[in-house]
Image (cartoon, rainbow, N blue to C red):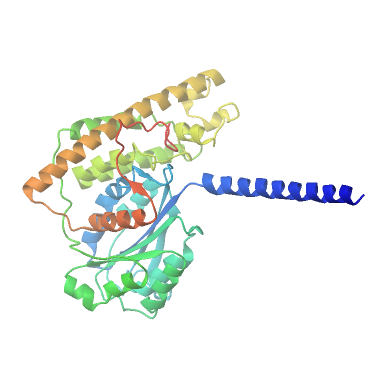
Amino acid sequence: MKNSKKMVCLWLLILAVTLTSQVQAQELAVVTEQKPLIQMAILLDTSGSMSGLIDQARSELWAIVNEFIFAQKLGQVPDLQVALFEYGKSSISRDQGYIRMIVPFTTDLDKVSQELFVLKTNGGNEYCGWVIKEATNQLKWSNSSDDLKVIFIAGNEPFTQGPVDYRPACQAAISKGIVVNTIHCGREKDGLEGKWNNGALLADGKYLNINHNQKTIHIDAPQDNEIAELNEKLNDTYIAYGTMGGASRHRQAEQDLNATRLSRSAGLQRAVSKSSAYYKNEDWDLVDACKDGKVNLENIEAEELPQNMRDMTIAERTAYVESNTKTRTEIQQKIQQLNEQRKKYVAAEMKKQQKDTNTLGSAIIQAVTEQAKKKNYKIEPPQKPINIENEPNQP
């Protein structure tokens, strides 16, 4: 009898250990399957003297995004979320610290671009500590210590201005794993005297100094015209659906035009971004929506579809979306291949002409690539021919 009881206890113990192991394995699988994330909040001084800084943000947004095209962590392409704040504008309420959150964390890069192009500057008080505090508290930051979470604050007045002390604000940020990078616009001596370097030191960040009035340098390359032509063909693969589809597609074209008008370099960098995993439009484009599982072509209402698809059978709808998916993939891969050739050509020309950049974009790229590597992200082009077919949110 005693032996029977012992056997029962032993079996119960084995069962408990087995169930615990299965639960732990399932939890581990969930953690492993969770995609890595890069969150970047950009805080821009929009006081009267900062027009050059805003122009740099407009023209270099896509170059910053493109720095992550080949980013990976544990074999996965991370998601990229961008948030945008402005501070120092007198037209914003004093009670709000002359601060406005323009865009919360989003993957909708066209929205970020659109907001940058409508930004205006005017005189005001620049409260660095306050805007860092707002960005830390208002945004939905990841709770994972494995994700890269960074703030970039750019401006030219002393970091010490305002009723919110920058020191506890920076310390509160890093206590949540948010690195604060400071970008002083103007002479390095003024930045040091204004304590911009201290803010970065307190939050494990990098202090950088830029010329916010420097124009973006563009080097003509043999690949430029073909990339621009492929971008136009890429736009033809988008299938706008839903109530906001038409407006969103119009916004896409508008941001193409904004970038191209601003500089040839910005237009080309935007085209490259649109060929990457970070340009996602599942909310209004059927190709992305079907791939993401957001839309089922069998169930979607006819009035949600573009006019040319409304009388199609389900088989015809599927074939139409698949055709656009295939065409888009081919165009995106071609743009990526051309861009790799272009980057090598431009790097050689920059070295030959002894050109150097000292802008918002170059500062952000320098800091964030270093900090990404510390979080075990790999940012390097593949050794084999580019094939983006298996990347997340790529058709």
**Relative to 205, 341 lies left or right:** left
Identify which residue is drawn at 44% across, 38% down. Answer: 392
Picture coordinates of residue 95 (x, y %)?
43, 75
Tell me if residue 91 comes above or below residue 57 in the rendering.
below
Q: Is residue 146 visible?
A: yes
Picture coordinates of residue 318 (x, y %)?
51, 22
Specify the farthest residue to the left. 353
- Report the quarter where the C terminus lies: top left
**Relative to 316, 277 lies left or right:** left
Tell me if residue 247 comes above or below residue 217 in the rendering.
above
Identify which residue is drawn at 35% across, 47% down. Answer: 378
Picture coordinates of residue 180 (x, y %)?
36, 66
Q: Nearer the viewer, residue 75 or 344?
A: 75
Identify which residue is drawn at 39% across, 40% down. Answer: 277
Picture coordinates of residue 255 (x, y %)?
32, 44
Q: Is residue 83 visible?
A: no
Q: Quadrant of residue 92?
A: bottom left
Q: Nearer the viewer, residue 130 or 98?
A: 130
Tell me if residue 286 comes above or below residue 130 in the rendering.
above
Specify the farthest residue to the right. 1
Tell me if residue 91 comes above or below residue 324 in the rendering.
below
Identify which residue is drawn at 42% across, 68% down. Answer: 174
Q: How many marks?
A: 0
